[in-house]
Amino acid sequence: MAMSPRVSLPVATIDASQRLIFETTEDQDRAWQIGVFYLRAPRSLELDKVRCFGEGLSFPDSPYREIPKYGELEGFISLENNQQTKLALQRHRWDEHYPPEIANFGRKLDEIGIGIVREVFHQSGIPEQHWGPASGGYAAGEGTAFLNFVHYDTREPDLGLRPHTDYGFVTILDATAPGLQVELDGSFVDVPVLEGHLVINFGEALNFITQRSDRTVSAIVHRVTTQSASNPVRHSIVYFANPCLDGYLQQYDSQGRRQGSSTVHRLFESLEHKLTEDN
Ligand SMILES: O=C(O)CCC(=O)C(=O)O
Ligand SMILES: [Fe+2]
């Protein structure tokens, strides 16, 4: 297979007060502009243990494969026309179906996700009283979130995951092997696994709610290359920070004036078709 160029991404950390810090303002500018960066993983996450849990799900006899489907988006799902197979659950079901340490891990990712979204709002100039309503509750600790455990079915010839942007605000990704690529200047480049770091990318809903503010973030197009049985096995832990799915998103400017809104359904529907339709 032809090698793709590798990208060098900005690196951020989360400080003790859950604020997102970049080494330089240029790094932060680039993260906002391209919509993706690395985040040093806080040690308290105990990623190794959570990775083990995810690996267990790829075995055919895993009891987690019996978790029922809740609608289209939750449960044990094999995505059509993609190799991606996943157990996906929204926050309000974590305690019912995940072991306590996994549900707690999800809540630690909630804190990170909220910290990142709040930093985006800080930079946007949107007055703080609007952050909750603008984000369908997410910035105020509501909204919803998915904690998904993903693997790639190498018996299928498809791409691991077709090119797409994520729907929500922020995606937090931990992957064990190469395969993720992002689109920069019209071509796909590899995002190497950086030990001890998560990959963060911004989604469409965050782009939408910052569009009329002082600082808009981009939602980056990304994909996962076709995984074959001879590749190192790619497992990933994916957390999606989302608005309440039945709610609204609001666009505010830095004067606190409402400039536009959308139902979450309307924004997400258009994106779903792009990912799974055969074309
Ligand atoms: O598995 C990965 O690395 C990427 C997953 C992803 O992009 C997604 O689920 O939206
Ligand atoms: Fe994605």
Image (spheres, helix red, strand yellow):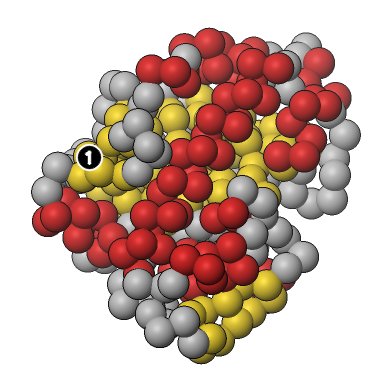
Q: Can the viewer see residue 57?
A: yes
| In the depicted structure, whether residue 62 falls above or below residue 248 | above
- Write the residue at 49% across / 44% down: 113
Q: Label 1 crowding class (10 Å Cα cut-off): few <14, some 14-19, many 20+?
A: many
User: Residue 105: x and y, percent?
Assistant: 57, 24
Write down the residue under mark 1.
11
SS at badge 1: strand
- Write the residue at 73% across / 68% down: 247
User: Residue 108: x and y, percent?
Assistant: 53, 30
**Is 188 left, or right, of 47 in this rendering?**
left
**Is 26 left, or right, of 121 in this rendering?**
left
The mark total stands at 1
Q: Nearer the viewer, residue 245 or 148?
A: 245
Q: Quadrant of the N terminus?
A: top left
| In the depicted structure, whether residue 45 falls above or below residue 208 | above
**Is 212 left, or right, of 5 in this rendering?**
right
Q: Looking at the rendering, which quadrant does residue 5 occupy? A: top left
**Is 69 left, or right, of 84 in this rendering?**
right
Q: Can the viewer see residue 274?
A: no
- Write the residue at 37% across / 24% down: 42
Q: Nearer the viewer, residue 154 or 38?
A: 38
| In the depicted structure, whether residue 184 falls above or below residue 141 | below
Amino acid tagged 1: Val
User: Residue 261: x and y, percent?
Assistant: 60, 82
- Write the residue at 35% across / 70% down: 124
| In the depicted structure, whether residue 98 falls above or below residue 214 | above
Q: Quadrant of the C terminus?
A: bottom right
User: Residue 237: x and y, percent?
Assistant: 53, 30
Q: Nearer the viewer, residue 1 or 36?
A: 36
